[in-house]
Amino acid sequence: MAITFTTPARASFLLRMPKLPGMRFLAGNKKARLALIILVPILLLTAFASYLPLQGPLQTNLRAMMQEPSFYHPFGTDRMGRDVLARTLAGVQVSLLVGFSVATIALVFGIVLGTIAGFFGRTVDRAIMSIVDIFLAFPSLLLAIGLVSIVGTGLIPVILAIALADVPRFIRLQRSLVLSLRSRAYIDAARTVKASQWWLMSRHIVPNTIAPLLVAGSIAAANAILVEASLSFLGLGIMPPSPSLGNIIRDGQLYLQQAWWISTMPGVVILAIALSLHFLSDGIREALDPRARK
Amino acid sequence: MLTYSFNRLLQLVVTTLGVVTLVFFTLRLIPGDAASAMAGETLSGEALDRLRDQMGLNKPILIQYFEYLRNLVSLNFGDTITTGLSIGDLLLTAIPITLAIAVATIVLTIIISIPLGTLAAYLAHKGHKTLDNLITGTAMLVDLMPSFWTALVFLLLFSLTLGLFPASGTVSLDEPVAFLHRIALPVLVLSVTQIATMARITRTAVLEVLSEDYIRTARSMGWSELRVLFRHALKNAALPIVTVVGLSFGSLLNGTIIVEFIFTIPGLGSLLVNGINSRDYQLVQTLIVFYALFFVSVNFFTDLVYKRLDPRVQF
Amino acid sequence: MNFMQPITDTVLQVHDLHTHFLTETAVVKAVNGVSFSLKPGERVAIVGESGSGKSAMAMSLIRLLAYPGKIVSGEVIVGGRDITKLSEAELNGVRGSEVGTIFQDPMSSLDPVMRVSEQMIPPIMRNLGLPRKEARDIAVGWLDRVGIPDAAGRIDAYPFEMSGGMRQRVMIAMALSCNPRLIIADEPTTALDVTIQAQIVELLKNLTAETGAAMLFITHDLGLVARFAHKVGVMYAGKIVEFGSAADVFAHPRHPYTQSLLRTIPNAAGAERERLLQIPGFPPDMRNPPVGCSFRERCAAAQDRCAVSTPELTFRGVDHSAACFLPNGLNDAPAPPKPVKRAIRLSNEADLVPQQDILEMHNLRKHFPGKATFPWSKPKTVRAVNGVNLRMRKGETLGIVGESGCGKSTLARLLLGLDEPTTGEIFIAGIAQMVFQDPYSSFNPKMTIFNIIEEPLIVTGAGTRPERAEKVRALIKQVGLEESYLDRYPNQLSGGQRQRVGVARALALNPSVVVADEPTSALDVSVRAQIINLLCDLKDDLGISFIFISHDLLTVRYISDRIAVMYLGEVVEYGPAEDVFLKPAHPYTRALIDAIPTPDPAIEAQRSINIISGELPSPLNIPTGCAFASRCFKVTDRCREEKPVLVAHSQKRDAACHFPL
């Protein structure tokens, strides 16, 4: 059998950097590259928003209300003459913060509780999973709406509410990954030398669940961004005047006919972010599964 | 089959009880009770206490819990706090509207997404990448559009610009034609997302089945591609598709909340958003429990359908 | 050489067939100019290792290649028409009715959600133009003919309600149901147990003889070729390198590859064994096949011209041709590889350290609870291991053989402490380690080879870090790999290299017993020989005791000192390897040995073969009497009532039978 590597030649220099497997993967995968092409400019613009020649996101200008997109206002202005691009970039900050935080919370709790449930089984498993089942009985947006209605609006409640809907899903995913890995032959191999449970879990099981979890994690981040936008749109998330992509669109809803850009532009940005996160997840999956590379 | 249904039903009851309990205690355990949260700072201490009495909040919590359970079982949901209307009556008018939207969306979704997904899978299987990528890419794009945004774009396009559908107006089941015309746009918005999701799932499921050995066997017996695709491939792919139909019902419910809000349709979703805005905990609690039960039951039934479709499952 | 014959005389003519897989990154040239033909009633075997292109070739014949496979040139003439030029609709008129196909894996080749009748009857109706009623009668007739009991009732069963052997019979019935003149069978018995394989091969032989259909039989098993085929084609790197009558090719192989292949198979007899031949190197990368002879880099007789021009198939006698410049292949090499002899301890008691038992099992049982029908009903018990008593002496190799489901793998898990026995005791002097069947899945993909071999040392706290590194380097050399492999990951190694690493890991703790569970069954023939040689060397050099579990009786015979034959969780015969093979005492052992085809058509032709009927009973319902009673040709009423125990049959042998042979 011939041993071959299928990394494109132009990425070969990265092969010499074994410490950075992520870099090698990003350079080698088409979808991952596409994701970065969309994501990196958005990140840069967001990070350096305050250095751009734009109005502040909260600054009003009554002399320039509802202006069409132009050179000075690429996304136009709203009913109070605020710059929609500046507000959108501020909203993206919120979105990315929500996406990242939710994915992190879901991953951490998912890994810990899912591993415990999958590895120890029996009573612990049954206890964890019956609680998970109860949470899974709520459609995710509904759960978030319900929680926000109790805890109140604002950034932190929104993050917690969305994360609470995702944690049970990650517990379930991690548990099924652990269960399928537990019967692998390399676990048996380690058990023949009487390896401890801790050893099996930390050396063999959890490391092999990380990659599929990252696939799910980037989708969860995209989903969280969409849910936050929905909540803010319904007036249950980030409250104005603090900009969020959802409440900018809500603002524009009343002026759809007069100023289509207020609602449209932030929507396009949400779509672009969600799309790139999905590409990223597809890319990770393809890198993991050689069969998917046709 | 009977044993399985029984066990699954038992599980359903346990989950339901869990949902009801969770919702009840979460609402009771928040700092400051429902009455003060509802009243805000407008009521004096005395008036607040009267409100508490009225809401039964002065009784021990376990008594409240069992009373609540008893009321639920006897379908007595109480009255709304703010307007004093019977919640049961409100549900009765709202449910048919939401249900009509949901059912219409599901029907439209199945009719369009399954052939579309099957076609994409077949194209991918045969190596026609450009066409497959076009379908798959569009589906992914549409799938990821926030539904409230799609709704606004559709509203702007079909209602405000082209004037094809009404953007607002009364909703009454007594006038079926007008009703259908009124819910057409919301259904369209929901369907677009659902079709995209289902088409992607159908494509994956069918594509996987197409590389199975028994598909090759069917071809080796001289069957045409069409028969192989629809008799063998789709029949086997139906199993994973049914499961996902059940699960994506959750996102459909999410979607109804949003479109009802945007198109001002007095269904369950509008009831919920209004309830939250007016801090009507009695109503919100009932609605959340209702949504969850609806979702869980749909999954219960899709599970049974799955078991019926798969002869391999032994009972 | 010209294979073209008058069309009337042939069922299938393949001429210069080229099949490529056009992947995104490269073109894999799987089939590179194959020509041959089949006459009516002829059984032709195509033999080759994985990657030789044999399956791609077979699937090209009826255009069942999956995307991105594509026939790029050549002709396939069936019934006077060129398959490669037919339209999709015309092709569907050929498939099933003119050419029947039998696939490898019966578990996945039948539609799981359709009844057998739904899969069998419509093609008969369509191809033979019959109404449903008559088509059903024909289908039932075929099922009956392929040996499905109660065919009229079973036709409405779902595939999952049948065993693998039964499903393959259904597959055969389906392929033959429209009276095709040509049958293509792609590894039809590979997924089956030896006894079932023997039944299926016999069935195919009889059916082709009765119907006069020609059969193309794809396989990697040279023994099956010897038992089954009139003619054989040996494929290597997408080409047929030798073609001829089976008798001639086996007796006088002319191509170096065929010659090497035949010597990689354990061929045991006598007090000395020939060390198995190892073919060096790897098959060529088919994305970039070499100019000249593709075997030259692994060939001891290679010459300069082999690198320049490609040898074509040329006549070596009547009905025999080979693609080599040398008339006699390896025998013309300046220094032909000489057979290396190695001594074998044939049950030589004096050789073994007297009375030093290294392993003992007493009345070992493992019962698994089955699934209960109702939550409140008592679940049935699967008796995987049902009372095993065995002992092993130091330095001895014990072979354990039996069909799948006989409990041999469960026994291994008990020995390794992976499962707790239900009852019984195991005593091991020292420790036991394991070599796994599929080396790839037995390695954590995230760990380097170094970490994999080091793991047992870390877990048991053996030595300091430098000491462990030292030990790992010693181990990798011991199994014949270079140190540079230590930095690699499992997916960067070939199958044979991985299994060597598996052996190295098993040796890390200096075990007294190494349990090898089917260590070679996932490997190709030529690689298999390397691993068997390695295990033999380790046994000789280190004095390790091996337990070798396998369904491959030839290998077990070659490597073992003693053999235990298992049936339904029990040992039914135990004794010195050669004795057991030459004179089996238990009817089941006899049946197993008969089922194994020998890679020699001359021997096969003379063998009187008793093919065992029936299949392994479910371990859920173990009969009260002798477990083998339902399949035994010597069965009496006593066998059905009274359970025979394992008792001394002769001085060295134990057997569990009332009427030993």
Image (cartoon, rainbow, N blue to C red):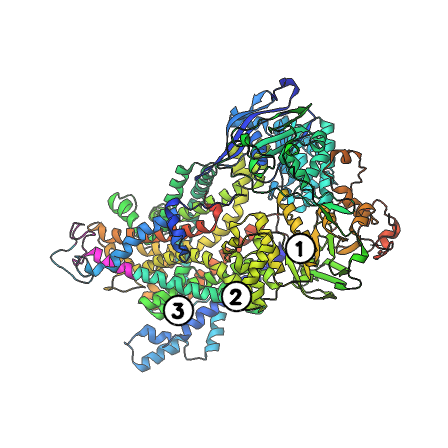
Instruction: Report x, y in % for residue C42.
Output: 69, 27
Q: Chain of mark 2?
A: C
Q: Chain of mark 3?
A: B
Q: Which mark is residue C538?
A: 1
Query: Does C371 sit above or below residue B182?
Result: below
Which residue type carries mark 3?
Gln
**Which residue occupies the foreground of this view, C483 or A13?**
C483
**Which residue occupies the foreground of this view, A78 or C551?**
C551
Based on the displayed image, in which of its 4 quarters is residue C61 positioned? top right
**Which residue occupies the foreground of this view, C377 or C324?**
C324
The residue that label 3 is drawn on is: B282
Give the quadrant of the N terminus of chain C: top right
Element assignment for label 1:
helix
The residue that label 2 is drawn on is: C466
Element assignment for label 2:
helix
Query: Does C396 sit above or below residue B136?
Result: below
Q: Which mark is residue C479?
A: none
**Marks 3/1: CA distance?**
77 Å
Which residue type carries mark 2?
Pro
Question: Residue, x 58% and y 65% (percent of image)?
Answer: C457
Which residue type carries mark 1?
Leu
Element assignment for label 3:
helix
Q: Is residue A87 magenta?
A: yes
